[in-house]
Image: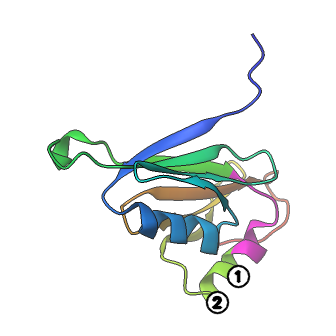
């Protein structure tokens, strides 16, 4: 088996709010929009995102909090850009002792997006 593409599916109350979040702050573009779903993509290796309208008859508590993690380059620069743009940052940029720098944003529907960059311990950049 050879996996050639990936899609992450999020079931949300407000697909338009999530579409705005992903296209405005994370560089996704809308590929297709229907009354039932919106398909977003990027031109790099990131997984595609499919936003589905939540079935209002399904209890909200039965839907797990979705999290998607993107490994990126130059996270410190992205953190500054997102801060200036007023992105909804919910975990400030920090560096873990094992060499991972990370930050989190949360979209209007509660989708947590973690941006991470792997840096050799003792290497650059210097993140709090």
* Residue 34 in picture, x, y percent from top left: 48, 52
Separation of disc 2 and disc 1 at Cα? 5 Å
* Residue 109 in picture, x, y percent from top left: 36, 62
Residue span colored magenta? 71-78
Left/right of residue 64 with respect to residue 10 in the rendered view: left
Left/right of residue 99 with respect to residue 22 in the rendered view: right
Name the quarter where the C terminus is drawn: bottom right
* Residue 93 in picture, x, y percent from top left: 61, 70
SS for dot 2: helix
Tell me what residue is drawn at x 79 percent, y 45 percent: 45
Judging depth in this view, the residue of 63 and 91 nearest the camera is 63
Query: Pointer 1: what residue?
Result: 81
Is residue 118 something one can see in this rendering?
yes
Decide whether residue 72 is among the magenta residues: yes
Q: Is label 2 in contact with label 1 (beta carbons under 8 Å)?
A: yes
Query: Relative to 52, does residue 87 appear above or below in the rendering?
Result: below
Is residue 107 something one can see in this rendering?
no
Tell me what residue is drawn at x 34 percent, y 48 percent: 65
């Amino acid at each position: 088996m050879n996996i050639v593409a990936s899609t992450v599916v999020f079931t949300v109350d407000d697909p338009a709010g999530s579409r705005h979040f992903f296209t405005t702050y994370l560089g996704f573009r809308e590929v297709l929009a229907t009354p039932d779903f919106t398909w977003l993509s990027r031109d790099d290796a990131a997984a595609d995102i499919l936003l589905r309208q939540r079935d209002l008859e399904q209890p909200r508590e039965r839907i797990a909090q979705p999290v998607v993690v993107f490994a990126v380059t130059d996270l410190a620069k992205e953190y500054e850009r997102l801060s200036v743009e007023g992105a909804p940052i919910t975990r400030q940029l920090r560096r873990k002792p094992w060499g991972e720098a990370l930050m989190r944003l949360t979209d209007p529907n509660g989708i947590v997006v973690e941006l991470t960059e792997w840096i050799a311990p003792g290497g650059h950049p210097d993140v709090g």
